[in-house]
Amino acid sequence: MIQPYADPTAATIKIAPSILSADAARLGEQVAEAEHAGADRIHVDVMDGHFVPNLTFGPGIVKWLRPVTRLPLEVHLMVERPDDLLDAFAEAGADTLIVHVEGAVHLNRTVQRIKSLGKKAGVAINPATPPVMLEEILPDLDLVLAMTVNPGFGGQSFLHGTLPKIRKIRSLIDALGSACDLEVDGGIDPETAPLVVAAGARVLVAGTSIYGSSEGVAGAIRRLNVRAEPA
Ligand code: DX5
Ligand code: ZN
């Protein structure tokens, strides 16, 4: 059962605002606002116009944001040939680099490269990709990002069909006794957050429901911050 602030001993949920939905004309302020409101990390969506149809940020954004916040910056690489970009984003100040299982041809090599750069390694998985694709790489990961929409755009509706997969990934992580984060991305709002938390997610990426909220950033983050009771 999930309740806001129900049990202080229960697992804490982390919130990762996605700057894709922030006001780009005042990005620094919007990131600072999220930090003051208790966000745990900042999610930077990198899209190349090939792996996904949209085109967004390059390493320059990470470099500019680095001095603006003390929060970890996680970079979600929705790109073809992610290997070509790892060094640039690492150098710009990213803390976590997330590549897609569908986009990295030599996934093990890519993950080892991320770790050799001194960064946390994450792997994202699209809604139509089965969780078995994660099994071999899981012991090497700091984070799994389960997509709850098809990547490419903010503001899409949550795909409820991804819930069984979140549960399956949770059980794969738990079976390993791993501290790997399980993060979800896409359509996360106060209605869907309890569902993904109940399924085993512990980090929630949210763009529209934070930066598009009429309650403002702080109110929106408070409303997302459900807690999971121990099983
Ligand atoms: C989608 C991106 C998400 C996006 C989520 O491809 O990976 O991080 O910002 O946006 P919302 O929360 O609006 O669904
Ligand atoms: Zn993302």
Image (cartoon, rainbow, N blue to C red):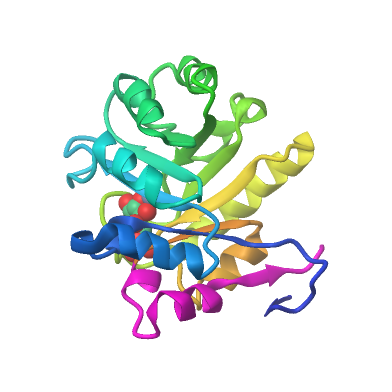
Residue 158 versus residue 122 in the image, above or below: below
Residue 209 versus residue 15 in the image, above or below: below
Residue 150 visible somewhere in the drawing: no
Q: Front-most of 63 and 112?
A: 63
- Quadrant in which residue 59 is drawn: top left
Residue 219 visible somewhere in the drawing: yes
Residue 74 versus residue 10 in the image, above or below: above
Rendered location of residue 84, percent (x, y): 29, 19
Q: Is residue 91 magenta?
A: no
Residue placed furthest toward the bottom = 215
Q: Residue at x 50, y 52 (%)?
A: 41
Residue 219 versus residue 111 in the image, above or below: below
Q: What segment carries the magenta color?
A: 208-231
Q: Front-most of 70 and 194?
A: 70
For the N terminus, the image quarter is bottom right
- Locate residue 88 relative to residue 6 in the image: left or right: left
- Locate residue 131 relative to residue 11 in the image: left or right: left
For the C terminus, the image quarter is bottom right
Rendered location of residue 47, percent (x, y): 25, 41
- Locate residue 97 relative to residue 6 in the image: left or right: left
Q: Residue at x 55, y 51 (%)?
A: 183
Q: Is residue 219 magenta?
A: yes
Report the label total. Answer: 0
Rendered location of residue 85, percent (x, y): 31, 25
Q: Residue at x 51, y 40 (%)?
A: 130
Rendered location of residue 94, percent (x, y): 42, 36
